[in-house]
Image (cartoon, coloured by chain):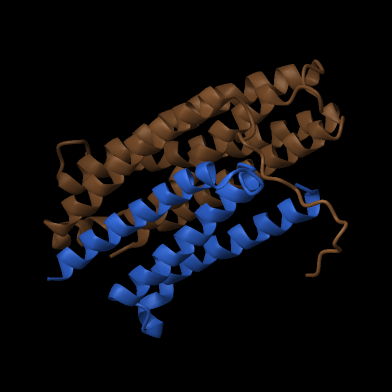
Chain colours: A blue, B brown
Amino acid sequence: MNTRHLNTVWVVLMLATLGTLGIGEFGARFGLAGPLAMAALLVICFVKGRLVVLDFMGLRGVKFFWRGLLLGWLLLVSALIAIAYWIALK
Amino acid sequence: MDIAPDTPRATPAAAPPGDLAIWFFILAELLAFGVFFAAYAFGRAHNVALFNEMQQTLDREAGALNTVLLITASWCVARAVEAVGRSRPATGARWLLAGIACGGGFLVVKGFEYADKFSAGINLSTNTFYMFYLSLTFFHFMHVILGLVILVALWVKTRQGAYGPADMNGIESGAAYWHMVDLVWIVLFPLVYVMR
């Protein structure tokens, strides 16, 4: 992994974190609330987690089995959170 | 992007970077945190009003600052591994030190958050939300402390020149553990501080 790529990943992660905070602070003012905000937060969370797994943990060039385990964990946790949120809406 | 016919294609590595044992440990940790996250999410589903009200009492900016600190620490550690892999242990040690500083910053910010809550009389039995908040974040807090102990050990050994392109196992294993701590917080922050 070269330094430039790692730096780019860090910048993207910082921007995504700003996005998460922005949704929490100002989302409702711009119509980004409720399930829509929830979906946006989960997407940002997955994108950030995927970058950490692939580029910081160094699993990008590793057999799918290992990437699949960690990204699968991320997907499973996101799905469970989404299901629980959906139950709460009912 | 076109690949010339005679360009050798990189075959994926069979095993992840570092010691295989650390990856089984990481998977076990992720499983534990996953159960915790699900318990929080389904606990919230049965107490939506309480969780939404109590979430407003959290310091969201402090949570975001801690996200910045942990991600930056992870970046520093990744840069350290990269530097050591290029036979630059002194540079690697400096990146590790920067990572340790960011991780320490996380503990300080979280310490202020805890002090604020405890001084307001909040504890594990205040309500269901704070039972989850305190236990989940403290469980993570303990992992940050363990991660920092590992980073300090890596820093000492890197300064001694113990790692290099031919011996990356130790530093890659420690780095993988630290990134796991970061990964968990990436889920924890939006779940506990933001989602409502």
Residue A88 visible in the shown view: yes
Residue for point 60% across, 59% down: A14
Residue for point 83% across, 51% down: B8
Specify whether B169 is left or right of B52: right
Q: Position of residue B148 (x, y in %)?
A: 56, 27
Q: Say which of B94 and A76 sits in front.
A: A76
Q: Position of residue B180 (x, y in %)?
A: 50, 38
Residue for point 65% across, 36% down: B99
Q: Say which of B173 and B122 sits in front.
A: B173
* Quadrant for the N terminus of chain B in the image: bottom right
Q: Position of residue B12 (x, y in %)?
A: 67, 44
The relative height of residue A56 versus residue B178 in the rendered view (above or below) is: below
Residue B118 visible in the shown view: no
Residue B179 is drawn in which quadrant?
top right
Q: How many marks?
A: 0
Specify whether B159 is left or right of B106: right
The relative height of residue A12 versus residue B168 in the rendered view (above or below) is: below
The relative height of residue B68 versus residue B5 in the rendered view (above or below) is: above
Residue for point 40% across, 63% down: A42
Q: Say which of B2 and B163 sits in front.
A: B2
Q: Position of residue B192 (x, y in %)?
A: 33, 53
